[in-house]
């Protein structure tokens, strides 16, 4: 496997603000991946960053004990670690780089349906199956990675509109919504809150019985995602440059009678599973199978990139995180259906409303520098 010509070799001195970053925070996130890969390696991305080339860096990261209290010395050691084992390469993407933000919503929920809590979050149905090129019937959309198992073979799964109109209702409860299948994990009071949990792929649930629960992505119906912001822009309701999570929510609040009209145009529907809250300071376990670190984990195109890769991201117009130009070392630990391209990233902002306020407005141009294991660099990048 050879590195893509999209990688252009740079030095650490070429990275704006490199010396001012908190490398120890990034190292802690990297170290979580270093332990995970002992059980299951990551797949190498198509751009040629071979997973096996991380072996030495991962072994060293596992051998380091993190200090209870970060110090100047520890931060310098973390910086030296990345400079010792990696070499930066700027990703020359044809359309430039772009970052958006995501977060873990935190909402009130009920373990049972009530007059107030009527919107369910569902677990994976028994008839939803994974599908690939070998098992996909002729004529089925090649995009679909999930299908409905029937006696006559796999067919496209029910979409958002069908599910929310009651297509998964039990035969003994026609027209009674989703009751009867036992798929309900919890019930929410607001359909828009539920939709944005679908978008984020995880949530913390403050249950009415006093428990704190976490849900995370389990599967999806399989259809393509169509964002409400794009739809509202196309129909002239919100100018494209003003589309944010906050502006979308405000529009839905002002037009409650049109929520289904807009949301059902996004046919993709997400199913969830419960997950433990092992460390309240960290986010959910995501695609790279480690807890996300606020401000240090980034979702990337997993077909192109290799999970665990450090990325230095320079987005000087982005100041939502700490009122300073965003120049941070991030670790690739998640992915998403909308995250496509070599210089495309989704920054994990954390959990709760404050993180949502940050994530909801992030849409900024950015330069991406991949930190490539040194063993892959010699003579391989421009």
Image (cartoon, rainbow, N blue to C red):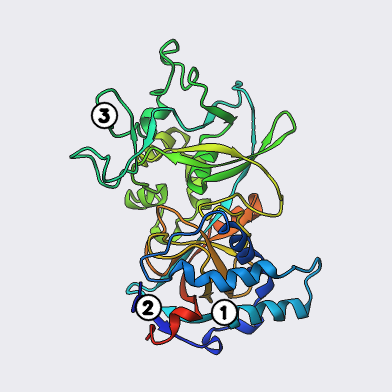
Quadrant for the N terminus in the image: bottom left
Which percent across, then down, holds residue 328?
59, 73
Name the residue: 24% across, 43% down.
Answer: 141
Name the residue: 25% across, 46% down.
Answer: 142
Q: Nearer the viewer, mark 1 or mark 2?
A: 1
Decide if residue 72 is on the left or right side of residue 44: right
Quadrant for the C terminus in the image: bottom left
The residue tagged with tag 1: helix, strand or loop? helix
Q: What label sits on residue 153 in the rendered view?
A: 3
Mark 3 or 2, nearer chain start: 2
Kindly identify which residue carries mark 1. 85
Kindly identify which residue carries mark 2. 92
Residue 27, placed above or below residue 355: below
* Local crowd size for mark 1, using a 10 Å CA cut-off: few (<14), some (14–19), many (≥20): some
Mark 1 or 2, nearer chain start: 1
Foreground residue among 255 and 187: 187
* Local crowd size for mark 3, using a 10 Å CA cut-off: few (<14), some (14–19), many (≥20): few
Q: Quadrant of residue 336?
A: bottom left
The residue tagged with tag 3: helix, strand or loop? loop
Name the residue: 47% across, 73% down.
Answer: 366
Which percent across, then down, holds residue 259?
44, 36
- Per the model, the C-alpha gap separating discs 3 and 2 is 44 Å
- Per the model, the C-alpha gap separating discs 1 and 2 is 22 Å
Q: Is residue 322 visible?
A: no
Mark 1 or 3, nearer chain start: 1
């Amino acid at each position: 496997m050879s590195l893509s010509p999209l990688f252009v070799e740079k030095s650490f001195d070429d990275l704006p603000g490199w010396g001012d970053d908190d490398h120890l925070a990034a190292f802690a996130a990297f170290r979580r991946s270093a332990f995970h890969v002992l059980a299951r390696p990551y797949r190498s991305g198509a751009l040629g960053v071979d997973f096996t080339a991380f072996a030495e860096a991962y072994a060293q990261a596992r051998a380091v004990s993190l200090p209870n209290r970060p110090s100047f010395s520890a931060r310098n050691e973390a910086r030296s670690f990345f400079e010792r084992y990696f070499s930066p390469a700027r990703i020359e993407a044809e359309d430039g780089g772009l970052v958006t933000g995501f977060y873990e919503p935190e909402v009130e929920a009920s373990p049972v349906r009530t007059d107030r809590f009527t919107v369910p979050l569902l677990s994976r149905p028994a008839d939803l199956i994974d599908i690939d090129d070998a098992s996909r019937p002729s004529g089925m959309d090649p995009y679909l990675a999930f299908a409905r198992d029937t006696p006559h073979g796999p067919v496209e799964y029910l979409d958002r509109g069908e599910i929310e109109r009651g297509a998964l209702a039990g035969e003994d409860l026609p027209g009674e919504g989703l009751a009867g299948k036992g798929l309900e994990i919890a019930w929410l009071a607001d359909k828009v809150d539920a939709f944005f949990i679908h978008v984020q792929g995880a949530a913390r649930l403050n249950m009415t019985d006093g428990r704190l629960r976490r849900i995370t992505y389990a599967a999806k119906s399989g259809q393509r995602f169509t964002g409400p912001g794009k739809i509202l822009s196309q129909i002239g309701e919100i100018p494209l440059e003003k589309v944010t999570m906050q502006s979308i929510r405000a529009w839905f609040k002002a037009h409650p009678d049109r929520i289904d009209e807009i949301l059902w145009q996004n046919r993709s529907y997400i199913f969830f599973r419960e997950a433990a809250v092992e460390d309240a300071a960290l986010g959910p376990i995501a695609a790279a199978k480690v807890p996300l670190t606020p401000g240090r984990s980034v979702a990337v195109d997993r077909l192109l990139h290799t999970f665990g890769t450090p990325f230095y991201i320079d987005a000087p117009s982005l100041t939502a995180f700490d009122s300073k130009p965003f120049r941070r070392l991030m670790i690739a630990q998640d992915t998403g259906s909308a995250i496509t391209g070599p210089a495309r990233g989704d920054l994990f902002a954390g959990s709760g409303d404050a993180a949502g306020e940050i994530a909801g407005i992030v849409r900024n141009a950015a330069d991406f520098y991949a930190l490539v294991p040194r063993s892959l660099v010699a003579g391989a990048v421009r």
